[in-house]
Image (cartoon, grey):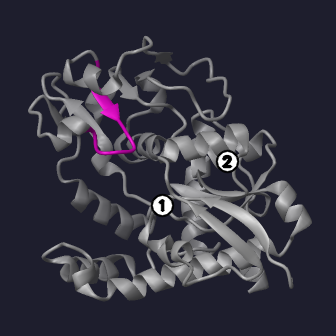
């Protein structure tokens, strides 16, 4: 490894990759170009459809589907994005929906069906709140990242081109919307829109204490031909990403870094509830449970035809560290 190889890594612009992006942490043997100038959906599309990057942060749901149909990617167990999802079910306030069961038989919007956030939300609604995903009429706005034929008994249709699923919620054309992001009407405090779970933070903390799941959104994928040619790349990249994350944790110990008045108290509360490394990488018990749960949801919802072994999905970099 006297001569470094050049690789591109497309990821979100997170604190956890700052040290790697700025070069204070380096991946041994790799000259890494870190690309952070696009949204998640564009990054996922460019990687899955066009294979434009050597390595990329990728939707966990899309990655499962990609592996199931044999696309030439392999992942390292680095999960750059996690998020609790109870706060991402939005309602039109005029529709009389006050509890999860009220969604049965209703029109619920999506940007797309495959998004990991939406997969988690549908699974949580089904298994935690008694709302079978096949009991809902789904209306989606966008193309899917991975080619897919929906199950025959899934009620899903595409909204007309040019229409906005958020606008349809505000105007009452649909009853509810699940979305990976906080939608604009909520940010603007539009009275026509509210959350299904206004106390989402309490529910998310209870969910974690009961299940030990901090939902995984994204993994880190590498093109198969790179791993075949340079089998050491996954281990070195994993170690660099872990070092960069640890540098972020160290930086966050300074409460002046973040413009939040009570940042330090939030940080301490997080550590008390989620532990010292909530964004843990690797294939330990905590991540195995989250991945197994997500795979079960994916199979139930017709995105993959079988559950795959973690050894099929990931290079277990810890075995080499």
Q: Which residue is mark 2?
A: 64
In the picture, the quarter occupied by the C terminus is bottom right
Q: Earlier in the sequence, mark 1 or mark 2?
A: 2
Image coordinates of residue 9 in percent, x first then y, are 64, 61
| 272 left or right of 117 in image | left
In the picture, the quarter occupied by the N terminus is bottom right
**x 36%, y 70%: residue:** 209
Spatial distance from mark 1 to mark 2, Cα to Cα? 16 Å
**x 52%, y 65%: residue:** 80
Say if 225 sits above or below 130 in the image: below
| 300 left or right of 312 in image | left
Toward which corner of the image does residue 55 lie, by quadrant? bottom right
Region of the chain picked out in magenta, as a range: 174-183
Image coordinates of residue 119 in percent, x first then y, are 49, 42
Toward which corner of the image does residue 185 lie, by quadrant? top left
Say if 217 sits above or below 22 in the image: above
């Amino acid at each position: 490894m006297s001569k470094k190889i050049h690789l591109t890594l497309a990821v979100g612009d997170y604190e956890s990759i700052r040290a790697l992006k700025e070069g204070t942490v380096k991946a041994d043997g790799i000259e890494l170009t870190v690309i952070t100038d696009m949204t998640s959906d564009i990054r996922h599309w460019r990687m899955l459809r066009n294979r434009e990057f050597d390595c990329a942060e990728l939707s966990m749901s899309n990655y499962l589907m990609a592996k199931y149909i044999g696309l030439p990617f392999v992942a390292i167990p680095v999960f750059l994005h996690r998020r609790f999802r109870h706060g991402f079910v939005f309602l039109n306030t005029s529709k009389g929906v006050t509890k999860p069961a009220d969604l049965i038989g209703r029109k619920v919007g999506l940007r797309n069906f495959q998004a990991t956030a939406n997969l988690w939300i549908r699974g949580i609604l089904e298994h935690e709140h008694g709302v079978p995903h096949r009991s809902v009429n789904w209306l989606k706005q966008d193309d899917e990242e991975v080619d897919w034929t929906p199950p025959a008994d899934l009620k899903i249709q595409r909204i007309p081109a040019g229409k906005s699923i958020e606008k349809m919620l505000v105007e009452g054309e649909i009853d509810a919307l699940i979305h990976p992001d906080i939608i604009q009407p909520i940010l603007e405090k539009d009275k026509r829109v509210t959350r299904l779970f206004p106390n989402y933070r309490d529910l998310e903390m209870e969910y974690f204490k009961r299940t030990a799941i901090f939902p995984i959104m994204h993994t880190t994928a590498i093109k198969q031909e790179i791993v075949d040619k340079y089998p050491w790349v996954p281990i070195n990249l994993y170690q660099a990403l872990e070092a960069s994350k640890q540098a972020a944790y160290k930086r966050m110990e300074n409460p002046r870094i973040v413009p939040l008045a009570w940042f330090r108290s939030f940080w301490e509360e997080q550590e008390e509830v989620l532990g010292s490394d909530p964004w843990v990488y690797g294939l330990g018990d905590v991540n195995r449970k989250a991945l197994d749960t997500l795979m079960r949801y994916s199979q139930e919802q017709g995105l993959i035809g079988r559950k795959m072994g973690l050894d099929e999905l990931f290079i277990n970099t810890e075995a080499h560290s």
